[in-house]
């Protein structure tokens, strides 16, 4: 099993290096994004859950303990990506996104709603940064960084949800 996980991490690194930027945001940019997450993260996640509730029976799909678990995983991912110099190559970040995607897949949360929520969250973070006292170049880098993070989350969550659903339909131990 460990060998399979290592091959998956290697495959992810190889494919992502061609698609995502290989730049490292400056410490000032990472700090500004981390501050925006701390200041607006709870509100933005609340808005995400409210959007989901308005479109699907979230309480019917995901019981409260599962939502609490999801919330904790999302916060762990947010904390992790703001500390990592290159979160798209960070194994722990990838693992957290995989676990979030599997949880969403298990509870049949519609992927299109997850994608809308991720975009909404990224937009909210970017708007939060407009109040920051960043230089213009740092503001642009922060917007690019948030865009890269939301793209990363969309790709990994979608992959995890579909892999989980394929595994559910075709159990791994089936012939």
Image (cartoon, grey):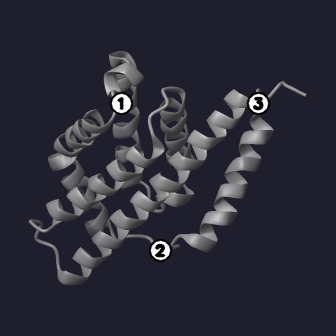
In front of the other: label 3 or label 1?
3
For the point 36% across and 16% down, the residue is 65
Q: Nearer the viewer, residue 23 or 18?
A: 18
Circle number at residue 170: 3
C-beta proximity under 8 Å, tags 2 and 1: no
Image quarter for residue 27?
Answer: bottom left
Toward the bottom, the furthest residue is 137
**Image side of residue 40 versus residue 24, left or right:** left
User: CA gap, disc 3 to disc 2?
Assistant: 39 Å
Q: Quadrant of the C terminus?
A: top right
> Which residue was labeled with disc 2?
23
Please tell me the numbered disc located at residue 72. Answer: 1
Q: Residue at x 40, y 45 (%)?
A: 114
Provide residue 142's location: percent of width, then percent of height: 29, 70
Q: Tags 3 and 1 in contact by the CB under 8 Å rule?
A: no
Query: Which sits earlier in the primary sequence, circle 2 or circle 1?
Result: 2
**Secondary structure at numbered mark 1:** helix
User: Label 1 neighbourhood size at 10 Å, few (<14), some (14-19), many (20+)?
Assistant: few
Nearest to N terminus: mark 3 or mark 1? 1
Instruction: Calculate the distance from the C-alpha at mark 2 to the C-alpha at mark 1.
Output: 28 Å
Q: Is residue 29 left or right of residue 160?
A: left
User: Of discs 3 and 2, which sits in the foreground?
Assistant: 3
3 relative to 85, above or below: above
Who is closer to the viewer here, 63 or 100? 63
Q: CA distance from mark 3 to mark 1?
A: 29 Å
Q: Is residue 10 left or right of residue 108?
A: right
As helix, strand or loop, the secondary structure at mark 2 comes to loop
* Spot occupied by residue 63 in the image (x, y as percentages of width and height): 37, 17
């Amino acid at each position: 099993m460990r060998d399979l996980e290592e091959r998956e991490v290697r495959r992810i690194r190889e494919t992502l290096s061609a698609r995502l930027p290989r730049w490292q945001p400056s410490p000032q940019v990472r700090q500004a994004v981390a501050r925006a997450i701390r200041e607006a993260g709870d509100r933005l996640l609340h808005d995400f859950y409210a959007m989901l509730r308005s479109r699907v029976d979230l309480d019917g799909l995901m019981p409260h303990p599962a939502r609490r678990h999801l919330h904790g995983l999302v916060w762990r991912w947010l904390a992790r990506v703001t500390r990592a110099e290159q979160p798209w190559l960070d194994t722990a970040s990838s693992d957290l996104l995989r676990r979030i995607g599997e949880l969403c897949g298990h509870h049949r949360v519609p992927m299109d709603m997850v994608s809308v929520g991720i975009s909404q969250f990224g937009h909210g973070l970017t708007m939060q940064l407009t109040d920051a006292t960043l230089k213009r170049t740092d503001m642009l880098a922060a917007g690019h960084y948030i865009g890269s993070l939301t793209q990363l989350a969309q790709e990994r969550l979608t992959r995890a949800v579909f892999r989980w659903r394929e595994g559910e339909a075709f159990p791994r131990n089936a012939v």
